[in-house]
Amino acid sequence: MNAQPKEKHLELIQGVITRMANNGFLLKGWSVTLVAAVLALSADADNTDLVWIAFLPAVLFWGLDGYFLAQERLFRKLYEAVILPDSEVPAYSLKVPRCPIGCWARSSFSWTLVFFHGGLVLALLLLIQVVGIG
């Protein structure tokens, strides 16, 4: 592969990596927004049982964020493979291996996601404990 197609190929891969990172950023924002909305509804309606519903977006968005992080890591590996001078990756290929459950789980429980999403879940648990819901 000569320099021009390789450069364009790397730009394509970088675009995918950027989109995956942006998706993770948006998921974090939506997670906090939905959890806060459910908490506000539960406080306003004097129905503290609604707090339990806040776990749903917190956990679902954690898993989805882990999926996007796993995909981003696979595309970073593809980028690294294309950079090699003797790369055998076909020109303009965006094919990455399937991400098995272990790949997704490792990404979901990376320090950054555990700190953010785990912190949100922990805050919900503490709120339930302090308020005495259940």
Image: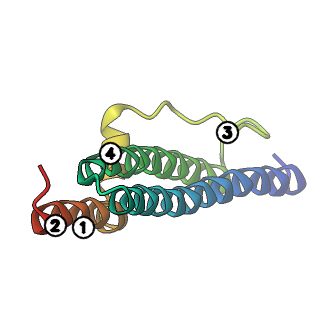
- Residue 26, image quadrant: bottom right
Question: Residue sitting at 84 percent across and 53 percent down?
Answer: 8
Front residue of this view, candidates 11 and 124: 124
Circle 1 is placed at which residue position? Answer: 123
Circle 2 is placed at which residue position? Answer: 126
Is label 4 in contact with label 3 (beta carbons under 8 Å)?
no
As helix, strand or loop, the secondary structure at mark 1 comes to helix
- Say the numbered circle drawn on residue 89: 3
Q: Amino acid at mark 1?
A: Ala
Question: Would residue 1 appear left or right of 81 to someone viewing this image?
Answer: right
Q: Amino acid at mark 2?
A: Leu
Q: Amino acid at mark 4?
A: Ile
Image vertical order of residue 55 relative to residue 126, above or below: above
Is label 3 in contact with label 2 (beta carbons under 8 Å)?
no
**Precedes in sequence: disc 4 or disc 3:** 4
Front residue of this view, candidates 36 and 40: 40
**Precedes in sequence: disc 4 or disc 1:** 4
**Precedes in sequence: disc 3 or disc 2:** 3
Circle 4 is placed at which residue position? Answer: 53
Could you tell me which quadrant the N terminus lies in?
top right
